[in-house]
Amino acid sequence: MSAPSQPTPPRLDEDNDLGFGSVVAAQSERRLLNKDGSFNVRRRGIGVLRSQSLYHSALSMSWPRFLCAVTVSYLMVNVVFALLFLACGRDALVGAHESQMGGAFGRAFFFSVETFATIGYGEISPVGVPSHMLMVVEALIAVMSQALITGLLFARFSRPTAAILFSENIIVAPHQNGRALMFRITNLRDSQLLDVTARVNCSWMDGASRRFILLELERSNVMFFPLAWTIVHAITPDSPIYGVTEAQMLGRNFEFLVTIAATDETFAQTVHARSSYKADEMLWGAKFRNIFNPADDDGLMSVDVERIDDVDRVPLPLS
């Protein structure tokens, strides 16, 4: 008796696969790309030691998590060495009395902190070979740890990243006697971005397969990005979303995947940002409000970033 045949994975358009693969793209029930640019895909079957890079994780994690990890590691190292000093005996440390340090563990812990940080107040000192050898080991670990943390701090501060703010919604707005798909972006940092390029890929379910088509933008590149940029895709008869209704977009699980690439003038390196919009994050019949402030006394223009999501409801022309 022959073995049962395996089901054939759904097929993707050969020219439109973004790298998610046919199975993931067709069977994933969640958005492919989160609002913060992270992917909704997980890899299994890889050991922790093989899949994790402490250096990469230390650079990519948020600042609160990084500072918390450094603080916890610092305390844990000193706790371990405090216990080791206690294991050397009650006479391994002399100087300030235990009662002044919160007990034997407290005295050992504070001595470990002084050794680790090379403070050396002189109130507590080791006695005997075991405690001196332990102090040498901790001093060596302290030197390497401080060098490592200093290097990570420098790498985090010097690593160029983009801080692009995307409008909360993508809108369908009147545009040149027709309709257009629009969203806004702005740079949250004072650093200047040059040669900014935008790409918008439209994705939707077509039967058992998922299609990906790169949308043609009215302007996909700007040389300078000092204020804000409204990215526009005109919904003409040549557009893949021409004539598609809001209900159809919701039913076919439409998703618009956005990538931004630019050159950071400060570091002269390319930085990237990405996000996505689902069909339920689209506003039909809306237009963005003006976010430009009147020129000040010096004649300088400015934008109010807090108004980047503000829209006015307007009627749409018939498709």
Image (cartoon, rainbow, N blue to C red):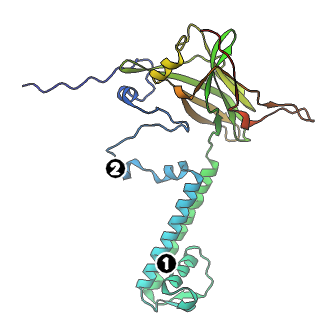
Depth-wise, is mark 1 or mark 2 nearer the camera? 2
Q: Quadrant of residue 170?
A: top right
Q: Residue at x 35, y 28 (%)?
A: 23
Question: Measured from the top left, where is residue 34 in percent x and y?
Answer: 51, 36
Question: Measured from the top left, where is residue 6 in percent x and y?
Answer: 21, 26
Identify the residue at the far top of this view: 237
Q: Which residue position holds label 1? A: 136
Identify the residue at the far right of this view: 297
Q: Residue 144, can we see it? A: no
Q: How many marks?
A: 2
92 up-or-down from 16: above or below: below
Q: Residue at x 77, y 36 (%)?
A: 304
234 up-or-down from 4: above or below: above
For marks 1 and 2, give the CA distance.
34 Å
Q: Which residue position holds label 2? A: 47
- The amino acid at mark 1 is Val
Q: Quadrant of residue 160?
A: top right
Q: Secondary structure at mark 2?
A: loop
